[in-house]
Image (cartoon, helix red, strand yellow):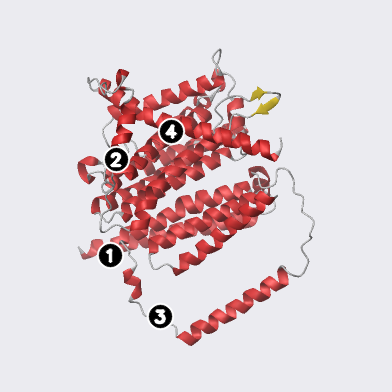
Amino acid sequence: MLLDTVIFYICAIFAVGGAVMMILQRNPVASVMFMIVSLIAQAVLYVQLSALFVGALLIIVYAGAILVLFLFVIMLLNLRGERFEEERPKLGLTTKYGLAIIFFFEIVIIIKQTVFTGSISQSPITVASDFGNVKPVAELLFTKYLFPFELTSILLLVAIVGAVLMAKKENNDKGEQI
Amino acid sequence: MSTVAFLIASAVKVTVIVTVVLMGVAWATWLERKLLGRFQHRIGPNMAGPYGLLQPIADAVKLIFKEDIVPDKAEKVTYALAPIISFIPALLSFAVVPVSDTLTIFDQRIDMVISDLNIGILFVFAVTSLGVYGIVLAGWSAGSKYSLLGGIRSSAQMISYEVAYGLSIIGVILLANTLSMVELVEQQDSLFNWFIFRQPLGFVLFVVCAVAETNRSPFDLPEAESELVAGYLTEYSSTRYSLFFMAEYANMIAVSAVATTIFLGGWQGPILPPFVWFAIKVFFFMCFYIWIRATLPRLRYDMLMNFGWKVLFPLALANVMVTAFLQRL
């Protein structure tokens, strides 16, 4: 039990710390790296909740594919930190701090309403032995959540077609100019 | 088994496997140079020790004592981290590969696998997909054009081939109905149950994509020496260079071990002890890798991308569909 707790706290620190560092970094490549750290820590947290499948997917899809694409784009454009520092912030200081304070209180209220109400039972929750495996997840996806699942895939398809369309259009314009 | 016994057993397993893999890496370089020499009518290394067997040690000593050069333009932290990032995933995938049947020592059943995850295959794909970061970051952080081009090529190549790579084993998963590596091996108990015979197209696709994923010839575009000097490796020297070098060979051994487990029946085999069969199959696969390198010329970059998206990807999709259809009949 103790080992679990220690692993949880280490991963929690890395997950939150990575996310914070991702925002604070000036250098886009460093941001991506901190995001990967955060994602891996989150995957470990999923594994600790015996959701192995979700943890593996998080790494395969996000860390393994999407963030490689991020890095690819950053490298292709050869972005280095300096360029961003010249940009003027569009919002004034008062607005920025005001928004930050509002968000902070919102989060405090949400946490207060969910975590500290005592609605979560103190006894450890028992889960089925195959909890988080591929089979139960797939069964839920193809029975109970079939409609949202298909809807998501249609949304992704539309996004792909849109991306192809936009890329093509630009090419055609250039072709006409030449 | 108590927690302490479990921890000790795991530590022993990890130590043994990491040691064996690192030894394997060292002598895989010897094997490659020796075989390449023979393929090209040369003798290959033969001076250090009998048959040149001490050559890897001599190479290691030489590399470690070289000067460690860091370019002025390099992003220092990333530059130092990149070799480590590329080396760790290569070792991680061995965690789910069963090297032998369950042993019984002192009435204790010991699984000859570090961890029998019920998502074993997905774990392998998760960690191998992280390996690309080492190469990409190395290319980016060195501050050199050749390195950057190598890194960009690598990321494009890995994304393209990972799709077909993942799809190529879905046929096996559909037939086996499990994602656990241990159960996969148990299902391949006779020669004709090996998935290489039940999923021949899947095996071919897996091998092609695996060669591309490990950046080996004929897909070694990221370090194409005739156009990019040494690609992402250009600015690296000394121990950092040797880490990349070791990562490449560790990846080859990892892919060979995974291919053996998924398609070639793992440790299954008659007469000889199981782990010997496993070693023989991995050795066969390594020789196959080297044979490919000696035989095929490097692809041109646009050919590589076309091949990945227009040939391998549709074939892998068709394989999944046909397998799923036949499975339901």
Name the residue at 41% across, 47% down: B84
N-term mark: 3 or 1 = 3
Helix, strand or loop at disc 1?
A: helix
- Vertical placement of residue B137 versus B323, above or below: below
Question: Disc 2 or disc 4, which is closer to the eye?
Answer: 2
Label 3 environment density (alpha carbons within 10 Å; few <14, some 14–19, many ≥20): few
- Same chain for marks 3 and 4? no
Name the chain letter of the residue that bears numbered label 1: A
In the rendered structure, the answer to whether residue B76 lies left or right of residue A51 reads left
Distance between mark 1 and mark 4 Cα atoms:
54 Å
Amino acid type shown at disc 2: Phe
Q: Chain of mark 2?
A: B
SS assignment at label 3: loop
Q: Is residue B278 visible?
A: yes
Pointer 1: residues within 10 angstroms few (<14), some, or many (20+)? few
For the residue pair A103 and B298, the one nearer the viewer reads as: A103
Identified at 58% across, 56% down, the residue is: A10
- Outermost residue to the top: B271
Residue identified by numbered label 1 = A173
Disc 2 and disc 4 on one polypeptide chain:
yes
Subunit under mark 3? A
Residue position for label 2: B65
Mark positioned earlier in the residue sequence (2 or 4): 4
The chain containing the residue under callout 4 comes to: B
Say the numbered circle drawn on residue A89: 3
